[in-house]
């Protein structure tokens, strides 16, 4: 069974490129473009992994992480923050709120992001 990824990214062109790249690698992909929509989709779609931007309209990624913590059913969802915010305080805050990893968008290619996600699935196989 293929893994489901939710991409929460307000930059439509980047979200589309990521979606196409992950689909070519056999993943099911759902995209959202703002924080409120992302949280609703996380609850309804129950993705295996969320690629979460921090700076989004309506609700930022930090608030999405805070909301996720309130639901036990979402505790096992892998969250990788994918943001251009690269300050140490942002990384620490995201991890304190439950993010499993933090990727600075400009530091990795699309292929490297896919490889990083695959590594996470290998390490965190859900029972």
Image: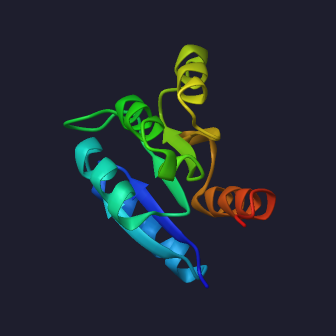
Q: How many marks?
A: 0
Q: Is residue 120 left or right of residue 103?
A: right
Identify which residue is drawn at 32% across, 33% down: 60
> Image quadrant of residue 2?
bottom right
Query: Residue at point 50% right, 79% down?
Result: 23
Residue 105 in sight: no
Q: Is residue 115 left or right of residue 36?
A: right
Residue nearest the viewer, comparing 74 with 111: 74
> In what quadrant of the picture does the C terminus appear?
bottom right
- The residue furthest right is 123
Is residue 60 placed above or below 15 in the rendered structure?
A: above
Q: Residue furthest top?
A: 89
Spot the residue most to the left.
58
| The N terminus, quarter of image | bottom right
The colour style of the image is rainbow
**Residue lying at 61% horizontally and 17% vertically, measured from the top left:** 88
Is residue 25 in sight in this rendering? yes
Q: In the rendering, at what x and y percent does residue 71 appear? A: 44, 43
Q: Which quadrant holds residue 107?
A: top right
- Residue 85 to residue 123: above or below: above
Q: Nearer the viewer, residue 66 or 26?
A: 66
User: What percent of the width, then of the height, locates residue 59?
Assistant: 26, 34
Q: Position of residue 18 (x, y in %)?
A: 47, 64
Q: Position of residue 89 (x, y in %)?
A: 56, 14
Instruction: Please give the name of the residue rendered at 72% of the width and 56% of the height, measured from the top-left corner.
Output: 120
For the view shown, which residue lies furthest in the front direction? 72
């Amino acid at each position: 069974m293929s893994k489901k990824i939710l991409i929460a990214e307000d930059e439509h062109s980047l979200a589309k490129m990521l979606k196409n790249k992950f689909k070519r690698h056999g993943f099911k992909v759902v995209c959202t473009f703002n924080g409120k929509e992302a949280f609703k989709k996380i609850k309804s779609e129950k993705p295996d992994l969320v690629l979460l931007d921090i700076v989004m309209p309506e609700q930022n990624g930090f608030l999405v992480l805070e909301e996720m913590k309130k639901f036990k059913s979402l505790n096992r969802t892998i969250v990788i923050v994918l943001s251009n915010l690269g300050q140490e305080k942002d990384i620490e805050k995201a991890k304190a709120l439950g993010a499993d990893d933090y990727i600075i968008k400009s530091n990795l290619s699309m292929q490297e992001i896919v490889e990083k996600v695959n590594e996470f699935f290998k390490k965190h196989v859900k029972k």
